[in-house]
Amino acid sequence: MSVPLPTRQKWFDDGAAALERAFPGTTAAQFGPEAPIRYACPICDGLFERSDLERNVLTVEHVPPAAIGGKGLVLTCKPCNNESGDSIDADLVHRERIDAVGRGEYTGETKVFLHTDEGRIAATLIADADSRQLHISDVNNPPGVVDAVRPTLKAGVPVQVEHRTWRFAELGANLSLLKAGFLALFAIYGYRLSRNKAYEVVRRQILNPDTAIIRQHLINLPPHIRRDEQHVVVMRDLACHGVMMRGQIALFPFEGDESFYDRLAGRADGDLVTGTVLGWPSGPTYGQKLSM
Ligand SMILES: [Zn+2]
């Protein structure tokens, strides 16, 4: 569902006012005292004017990505939304599908390789609610390979299945959740959070998805937690914000806590998830609803 222009304009106006409230004179410093106040992209901190909405320079970001059920939540600039976002979001979507196939929940067509003692062959796995079928064709395989493998398959010998096209980067999938969590927190807390020193490393990591800057930011939740459950949690034990999505929880520092990720690296696990649940933002409030 696309977010209508009047809603996007309200998100812009409220965000620009929130930026001016938290950091007075931000627009004037760059564009002069007469310039209408601008909205800052929470990721790159670039300043944008209201007409950038109509020109699609400022775009709605789905949190988490739309392909896995996320809803439009905040405005980011097009380069941050598309160029740095598309590849990591695709990594997350692919990982979600692979997990769903593993749990027997994915329906649709999947290109796979079958590994047998006789060799590897390309096939298509077609899954619907009731059944799974493997389609094997000579067209996708070197001559003779299918015939060689057929007796093994007919005998019902278990074979190993590998996904052909769903190669993805684990780092990218993890960073897609880092970005989604950061934007959910920005929707709630606004620029005091996104422009806080402790979040410089988060924004740098989102803008540089090919390099692991933050060693760890995710905790796996126990399997009984539904994957579509989404909450923002204030976690007193670990002294951080947690954003729960897709069976994991992404961790973020309290304001000013610049050494948070250094302390966290290697020590967080699922037993530590306790805290106050704040729910999930339906749109950006930028800190207005909080007494800060
Ligand atoms: Zn940006």
Image (spheres, rainbow, N blue to C red):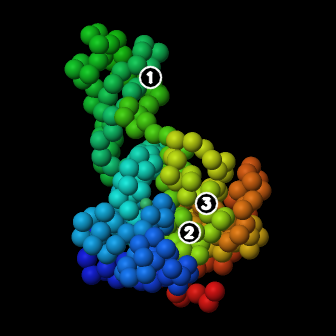
Q: Label 1 CB, ligand 1: below 8 Å?
A: no
Provide the residue designation for mark 3.
200
- Image quadrant in which the C terminus is located: bottom right
| Residue 194 circle label | 2
Tell me the SS state at disc 3: helix
Q: Nearer the viewer, residue 24 or 59?
A: 24
Query: Which callout, 1 or 3, points at the residue further toward the start of the chain?
Result: 1
Vertical placement of residue 134 versus 202, above or below: above
Mark 2: C-beta under 8 Å from nearest atom of ligand 1 = no
Q: Describe residue 168's horizontal placement relative to residue 147 as left or right.
A: right
The residue carrying pointer 1 sits among few (fewer than 14), some (14 to 19) or many (20 or more) residues within 10 Å by Cα, namely some
Give the residue displayed 38% in from the left and 31% down from the top: 164
Q: Which amino acid type is shown beneath numbered disc 2?
A: Ser
- Label 1 and label 3: CA atoms lie apart by 45 Å
Q: Nearer the viewer, mark 1 or mark 2?
A: 2
Q: Could you tell me which secondary element the residue under label 1 belongs to? A: strand
Q: From where the camera sits, is residue 246 visible?
A: no
Residue ID at (30%, 68%): 52
The 10 Å Cα crowd at callout 2, few under 14, some 14 to 19, many 20 or more, is many
Q: Closer to the N terminus: mark 1 or mark 2? A: 1
Q: Nearer the viewer, residue 254 or 143?
A: 254
Q: Report the residue marked by disc 1.
A: 115
Ligand 1 shows up in the quarter that is: bottom left
Task: Give x and y (percent) for residue 178.
Answer: 55, 57
Q: How far apart are the alpha carbons under marks 1 and 2?
A: 47 Å
- Residue type at tag 3: Glu
Q: In the rendered image of this protein, does residue 202 appear above or below residue 42?
A: above
Say whether residue 199 is visible.
yes
Q: Secondary structure at mark 2?
A: helix
Q: Earlier in the sequence, mark 2 or mark 3?
A: 2
Between 15 and 102, the residue placed more toward the observer is 15
